Image (spheres, rainbow, N blue to C red):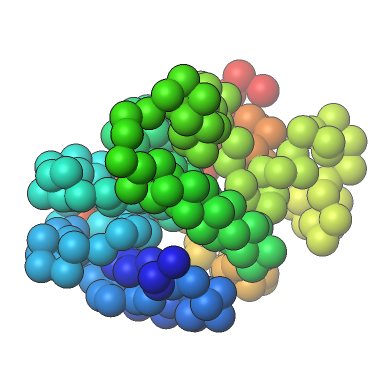
Amino acid sequence: MSPIRTVIIDDDPAVAGVHHGFLMAHGAFEVVGTAHTGGQGLEMVRSLRPDLLLLDIHLPDFSGLDVLAKARADAGGDLLDVFAITAARELATVRSALAGGVIEYLVKPFGSAEFRSRLDNYVANRSALLKLRDSEHGLDQQSIDRLRSTVPQADPAQVRLQSPVAQQAGAHSAGQPPKGLSRTTLDAVTDLLRAPGADYSAAELAAELGLARVSARRYLEYLVSVSKAKLTPRYGSAGRPENRYSWNPRR
């Protein structure tokens, strides 16, 4: 099979670079373009005709969901597959992405092993799909059933969000926090969020507690994953949302 020609759309150059490295290390992919806005990405889809699009949802000019719809329309009859790779975990966003035809929805952050596994599955499924497409005859029932097995059939309301914190949330929601999270620090984060009117970004909470920003985000994401905290994106003048965290009053 020829290299899978891929375009990456992510507003963070560092994150896009990480994705690029993953794809190159895998060996089955060729990165033909990298864009940091939706408009740039759509131009690349139109001119480069990629096989695969790695798509962030939060972009500085317009939503990745709009990019998804326009890219699908621009592809016409061409086979364009889309991975949504994003921090967006709101139910409405996930449902819209799945309804728009994304074949993978990965929530940042995730580990290299998880990404590698998804890429491996995609390569195998794409190979099977291309064989069906190149058949001289129409699809029989067995082929249709095999094709359906290569397409995610997840219930959008129960989609598995693949953040390492979210993966462990169910096992720890009623007991100790996941490995790598301190009970003492978790209690301190909880106390701050429970204060009347509390509303923090990860950076603000990190400064308040003397934590690294990435560590503060892990605690906040854990509390969101067990429904003890709420995440609310707020859009600034540049259009890129800032994630704000507050206590969930229903808990």
Label total for image = 0
- Where is residue 116 shown, x and y percent of the image? 61, 64
Q: Is residue 208 left or right of residue 145?
A: right
Is 212 placed above or below 93 here? below
Q: Residue at x 11, y 61 (%)?
A: 46
Q: Please state if 142 lies on the left or on the right of 96 as rendered.
A: right
User: Which residue in the rendered view is the most extreme toward the right?
Assistant: 175
Q: Position of residue 220 (x, y in %)?
A: 62, 49
Confirm whether residue 249 shows in the render. yes
Where in the figure is residue 45, as x and y percent of width and height?
Answer: 17, 61
Q: Closest to the observer: 56 or 184? A: 56
The image quadrant that residue 228 belongs to is top right
As drawn, is 187 to the left or to the right of 41?
right
Q: Nearer the viewer, residue 17 or 214?
A: 17
Front one among 156 and 74: 74
Say which residue appears at 16% left-offset and 44% top-offset.
77
Residue 29 sits in which quadrant? bottom left
- The relative height of residue 193 versus residue 92 in the rendered view (above or below) is below
Above or below 53: residue 195: above
Q: Residue at x 10, y 67 (%)?
A: 47
Q: Is residue 223 depicted above or below 13 in this figure?
A: above
- Say which residue appears at 25% left-offset and 63% top-offset: 50
> In the rendering, at what x and y percent does residue 167 appear?
71, 44
Task: Give 106 or 180, whichever is nearer the viewer.
Answer: 106
Q: Quadrant of residue 52?
A: bottom left
Location of the N terminus (image quadrant): bottom left
| Residue 184 visible, this angle | no
Q: Quadrant of the C terminus?
A: top right
